[in-house]
Amino acid sequence: MKAKQAINNIESQIQLIDEDIKSIRQALSDLEEQEQKNSGRVVHALDMFENLQKEVTSDVDRYGSALSEIEKQVGNIQSEFSQFVTLNSSGDPVEAAEILDTAESHIVALTHIVERVPEIVSALQAKLPDQLEDLESGYRKLLESGYHFTETDIESRFQQLHASLKNNMANVSALELDNAIYENEQIQEEIDALYHIFTREIESQKVVKKLVKQLPGYLKHAKDNNSNLAAEVERLGKTFVLNESFSQQLKELEAELSSQEDVVEDALKDSSETQKAYSILKEELEAIEARLKEIEDEQINLNDSLSKIEKDDANARQKANIYANRLHAIKRYMDKRNLPGIPQEFLELFFTASNNTEALMDELEGEKINIESTNRLLEILTNDMNELEEATYRIVQNATLTEQLLQYSNRYRSFDDHVQAAFDESLYIFEREYDYAASFKVISDALEMVEAGVTDRFVTSYEKTREQIRF
């Protein structure tokens, strides 16, 4: 039994040794495999590193102040490769692989940096300084040419830009590229802002130059118009009662034009004397130009109002004569009807129109004509005449139709008491009360009872043959 147990122990020990040997062999195999992997990877990493070095050394000036830090990081990567070789050759390929991972990461990161740096450096060392130099040179020339600016901090802004360009070099040197790009953008925005200021003044100068040539002529035209209107007001004032607002408006415009003339004369002077920026002058002169257009519109309206006075006067005189003739024509028209009497409605309308015609003529024959009063009287008289004419046609139509229906009723009176009674009533109203509308209604209602539609037949026939008033 003891011998058997001893044999079992020996077999167990032999099995453990076999497993250890297998583990050792596997580890050796893994190390050999890692070494092979490292060998393959290091070739790729070295190619990347070589390309990076070629890129940097091909044109070192492109990297400006960043070159020192780039070279430092290139040296660090070289140290990492040396450390890798030592570890890999001394039998520690796993740690060597970790070092190789780090080196590859650094190569990728530095390659990305190297790709970005030239554009940043170009902007910082060439593009932006050149723009700033052009701006400063242009600014000096503008000052020499008599330009002024509303901004009082331009010189200090130039100094700040120079300082910003210099300070941003530190970001490039430290490879703080995001900060460097941001600062470059801020510098560009400030340069663009200054460029906009100078462009604004240059463009304003062109507008000012054009306006100082045009505005004197515009002003002279406006002042001539004002003088002509004043002369017209004076002429019309001898015949008509004019509203005081005409003269007052012209005085106000004259004063305003004189004030604007002073502004234009100042703009004609040398800019160095006025000490005004062209953008300010532009706003002032454009405001004057716009106001002169408004003034011209006001003068046109004023001229139209003055012209209308004599037109209204001529129209009122013509209408007064026409209406006087119409009154005579209406009177003759009524007289020819041989009516038993004239209705009170007609008499009131006729005498009202006649009185208002005389009132209008009296106004027109006054020492000075009040055209506003004249127009009011004419409007009233026009309404009077329209009412009188309508009443005349209505009265004559009712009277004529009544006579015709009274005559037509003879065919029914002898056997229809209702028609006979209506005949008597209608005739009484017609001959005694002169209410021809009421007389017509009485006889027409009675006839409609015995012959429907008879009234419309007579009305239609009358309207076709109605005699017009001949004016």
Image: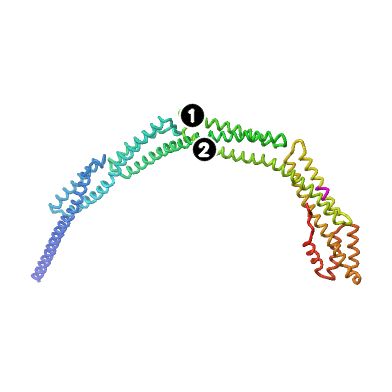
Query: Quick check: is 313 in the magenta stretch?
Result: no
Residue 50 lies, in percent from the top left, at 19, 49
* Horizontal side, residue 44 vs residue 286: left or right: left
> CB under 8 Å between callouts 1 and 2?
no
Residue 365 spot, x, y in % from top left: 77, 39
Q: Quadrant of residue 390?
A: bottom right
Seen at 76% across and 40% down, the residue is: 364
What coloring was used for the rendering? Answer: rainbow
Q: Quick check: is 350 in the magenta stretch?
A: yes
Left or right of residue 408, residue 381 in this image: left
Q: Which residues are magenta?
A: 349-353
Q: What residue sits 13% from the left and 54% below the top? A: 91
Task: Specify the label residue 286 is tagged with.
Answer: 2
- Look at the picture and state if 195 lies above or below 437: above
Q: Tell me which numbered mark, 1 or 2, is placed earlier along the sequence.
A: 1
Of all residues shown, which one is farthest toward the left? 3
- The residue identified by callout 1 is 269
